[in-house]
Amino acid sequence: MEMLKLGCIGAGFIGNFQAQAMKMVRGVELAGVYALKGADKLAQFARDNGLGDCRVYPNVKELCKNSAVVALFAPNYVRIELTEQIVEAVKAGAELKGIICEKPLGRTVAEAQRLVELVSPIKLPTAYFENQIHIKAIKNARSQLEPVQKTMGPVALARCAEEHAGPHEPWFWDPIRQGGGVLSDMGCHSIAVSWFVLTPVGKPVTFLEPVWVTAETALLKWGRDKYRRELRDRMGVDYGKTPAEDFCTGTIKFRHPDTNQMVIGQFTNSWMYDKQGLRLMMDGLGPGYAFEVNSLSSPLEIFISDAAAAAAADAESALEKATATRGLLTVQPNEVDLYGYVDELADMRDAFLAGRDALLNWQYGLEITKLVQAAYMSAERHKTIYLTDPAIQKELKSYQSLIAQGKGAEVLGLL
């Protein structure tokens, strides 16, 4: 198998998580890193774990010259600037086989559209990294239910949720730099998975047509005085001035283009889930059948008493976003595989070596951005947004939510 040399832009949480997943993927090595901070540590991790002779590069151009694939794992607010540099490097002679962008593709539809347009002239395969679609439990459920669907019909209702106690880095909490709150950060996951679960097996990921979106956003925990002060002191972000939502929920109706059958996808996301840690819950209901996924169902549980708690200083050694080091802890022995990162990398490897887009490309990322922004529009206006309306389609092209503009107090209020 040909070895695919991957260059990573960004060395934060997602870059390190992806590096862990690479240990389980044949044919991919971490060849280089460019980042403002953390690059040396990530490169050392790669060398220590047999992921290749990873080197730290001083700029995007040098990274591209020494990589076959470049992954944008940097913060949302620098994606366009970095993509421009990648395109310039390719035009200057860098021989890339593809470009990866971590979700979300853009903070607005205009940004996502700009990224698609930037890479179009260089005609390179793209991969939009949405790991949850690659979760083995989701894929296995669809595969096992394929013959059932042929007899009974496709899934009619999908419900997807992702919840935890809040992001790691300050920029995630900042609605201006991040592009919103939990809807932008995690709603993109749940919207994508619900669309995928509803799609008949064997059909393209955008086969179902989105018809309308209705959504709500709220600031339920981090707007309270106590937690607002905690967030300001810990992350330097003041939700008294520029709040973002810590909870969202919504519904999207999709239409089957061949049968006109309508199906429903529901999403729920929060940064206020103070239990064992990150929880993913998905289910699909069809006529006469169903499946469920719960990431907190683990074959391993650990109990730590109050007396022993001082010895367990790192809560996240058990589970991503864990907030406790004592009591009955859920432990996932292999989170990167559980959440779909391993299969996501493998899909990218196979696609780029074959000279084609990954299962999810940047155009798909643009479609997800449209649905996320339509959800913000619905929550702002307290009305259903009809996605087939040409006027709405035009408005979404230049729409930026009030929350993303730093005007979240106008729609969220403060407690």
Image (cartoon, grey):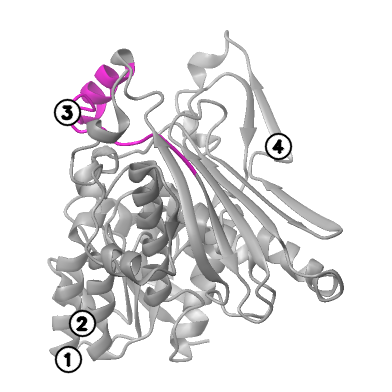
Q: Which mark is residue 237?
A: none
Q: Looking at the picture, which amino acid does disc 1 mark?
A: Gly
Q: Which mark is residue 65?
A: 2
Gap between marks 2 and 1, in whole Å? 8 Å
Residue 141 vertical placement versus 351 (above, below): above
Image position, residue 70 (x, y; %): 30, 74
Q: Nearer the viewer, residue 74 or 153?
A: 153
Q: Residue at x 45, y 29 (%)?
A: 272
**Numbered disc 3: secondary structure:** loop
Mark 3 or mark 4, earlier in chain: 3
**Was residue 12 drawn as part of the magenta stretch in this picture?**
no
Instruction: Name the residue type under label 4.
Output: Leu
Q: Which one is in front, 161 or 330? A: 161
Q: Position of residue 263 (x, y in %)?
A: 65, 62
Position of 185 with respect to 21 (left or right) is left
Q: Nearer the viewer, residue 414 or 46?
A: 414
Q: Which mark is residue 241?
A: 3
Q: CA distance from mark 3 to mark 4?
A: 43 Å
Question: Which of marks 1 and 4 precedes in the sequence?
Answer: 1
